[in-house]
Amino acid sequence: MRSDNLALSSAQDAIGLGAAKVDVAYGGVSAVVDLMKDFKARLVTASEDGVDRSKVNIELSQLRDQMRSIVENSSFSGENWLHLNDQNSQGWNTPKNVVSGILRNAQGQVSVTTLEFGKGLAELDGLDDLSLLIDDVAGTGRSGLLTSNAFAAELGVPQAYVIMHTKGAAHNTEGIEIELTSATTADQVADMIDVVEAVLAQTVRLSAQLGSLSARIDLQEEFSRRLGDSIDQGIGRLVDAEMSATSTRLKALQTQQQLATQALSIANGSTSNLLQLFR
């Protein structure tokens, strides 16, 4: 039981590490969702007649750069769950796992339990798995929500719009980055809005998945702490002294010692009185 409790304590440390990874990813996705709402709002503004769309595009560029900055910095302990880069491209072939605790079954076998995040969480009908925001690696067979042109194809938009390009010239042929110029038509802006709305909806879904995973980790962390306390109490009942009974016995012994001391004092006093009479 003490061994299990030590293992549980280590699992709690691992849960804390996993919780931090999920929280960082969740914070990054939430920030991107807010920026994408602003991105869509700027496109709606650009759909009005008489608006200088080239000036609106300056704001779109700033929002796009900020989204990339947030995603690239959403890293903890060397892992970035939102950005596929050269360092973790191999890791995205399998889902991410975070430790949730240890389990001892009826046969006495101990195993580590995990929670899974990754494959299939953000898939669309007819599209491959999309469970990260940016893909900057060629030949991975994966795409990021912000860098995929699959949304335009799914919606039937004539242009394969993407919110941002992946880095590297080879990727720039995969889609047309959303960009406004003085020559951009109202119909093109409407198509851009449709694509951004589809990407935003999927990003919100990804945020919800990360948020629910974070909440579950918090619950598991609280349960593990209570389980450890219960095991400590159980060990105490088995091997530690019963303090109330021990305290009662100690008080009885102290009382007996006091009574014996008083009896000796009385006997000594009586002897002294007899000696006084003989004197």
Image: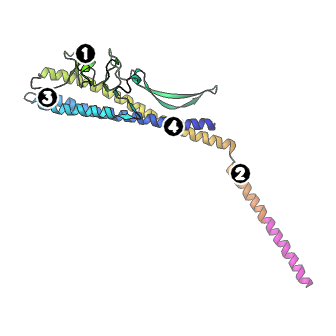
Q: Quadrant of the C terminus?
A: bottom right
Disc number lying in front (1 or 2):
1
- Quadrant housing residue 136: top left
Give left or right: position of 269 versus 12. right
Give left or right: position of 148 versus 2. left
Disc number lying in front (3 or 2):
3
How far apart are the two marked residues, 4 and 1, measured between alpha carbons? 45 Å
Number of residues whose C-alpha sits closer than 10 Å to that of mark 2, classed few (under 14), some (14–19) or many (20 or more): few
Q: Look at the image and give the residue range highlighted in magenta.
A: 259-279
Q: Give the camera-side residue of 75 and 258.
A: 75
Secondary element under disc 1, as helix, strand or loop, is helix
- Quadrant housing residue 188: top left
Q: Which residue is mark 3?
A: 46
Disc with the residue nearer the chain's start (3 vs 2): 3
- Quadrant housing residue 251: bottom right
Question: Label 4 near label 3: C-beta < 8 Å?
Answer: no
